[in-house]
Amino acid sequence: MHEAIDRAVGDAVETLPEILAGAGTGGIRYALRRMAAVGDPAELLTKAADWAVHPAPEMRQLACGLAVQGYKAGRKQAVEILHRLSADEERSVRDTAGRECGRLLCRDFSRMLEEMYGFRTDPSPWVRRAVALAAMTAGKERRLERAEPLLKLLEPLLADRAPEVRRSLGPVAIGGGLLRYYPEMTFEYLVKWSTANDEQVLWNVAMSFSGPGAVPLVKKALIVLRRLSLDERRYVWRAVASAMWKLGRKRPEIVRPELARWLEDERRVRVARAALKYL
């Protein structure tokens, strides 16, 4: 496939859709690298606009990456392309658009942060979800000065009840991303958010401790989860139970004794029983 892509990029770019039909991420990323190596930003942005409406999802994925490569030639147009594709009918395209927004955050943090504020209030839950994916991608750089702006970017989404958003926020973007990349500051924010009354906010806090970023912080995580386990709302305490069994699989020597104590506490016994089903 690489040889065919090389020939297409060099002489017949219009044949790329046929070559990339059914291609995986590797082939699409290779085509992107080859096009970025020989094309100028304006040309790449034009191709991004053309392929953003192509019927083949592989070409729409490629358009996401080309929008980033052409960003300097037309910032607004590049962001508009990613905005549209972040709500694409294909999950692979939506995921790529969200990650590419994160790469733009890495490249042009202040300006792209302002653009992501607009995504955050979009009517489409898929566009709002892209904010979580972008923040997680940008967090991988581990630039400490960006930790707080990224956490504040996500903060208004904590109360978003759309399944598309919440599934990618607490357990993934925060628990799998920012808590791992910026453990101290993210934990401070989780403690602050845990004092909210909104059950969706508390669900996201609890589920953040179900991600891999919570494992090294398990003792500190238990401080927050103990308090949340007292919440009478099923939506909240079930999230606590989920976090406890996932933490328990990684750190049973710490979590199991905690759950044993909860079994003796009538206020927490249902949470302990729900968690122990999976341990």
Image (spheres, helix red, strand yellow):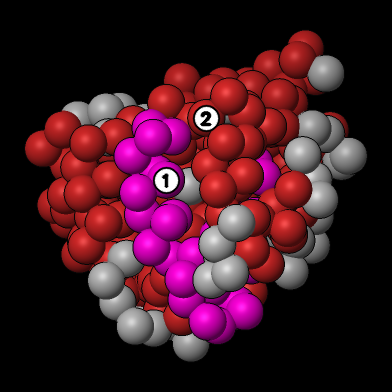
Give the CA separation, mark 2 to mark 1: 9 Å
Q: Nearer the viewer, residue 99 or 3?
A: 99
Q: Which residue is drawn at 60% across and 56% down?
A: 264
In the rendered structure, which segment of residues is drawn in magenta? 217-246
Which sits earlier in the primary sequence, circle 2 or circle 1? 1
Q: Nearer the viewer, residue 70 or 167?
A: 167
Q: In this view, does 177 lie to the left or right of 273?
A: left
Residue at numbered disc 1 = 222
Outermost residue toward the front in this view: 264
Residue kind at label 2, given as amino acid type? Ile
Q: How many labels does the image show?
A: 2
Q: Does the magenta stretch include residue 108?
A: no
Q: Is residue 196 left or right of residue 219?
A: left
Q: What element carries label 2?
A: helix
Q: Is residue 275 left or right of residue 212?
A: right
Q: Which mark is residue 277?
A: none
Q: Is residue 238 magenta?
A: yes
Residue 269, position as x, y percentages in the image? 64, 63
**Quarter the N terminus occupies:** top right
Residue at numbered disc 2 = 254
Residue kind at label 1, given as amino acid type? Leu
**Residue 128 is at least partly visible in this image:** no
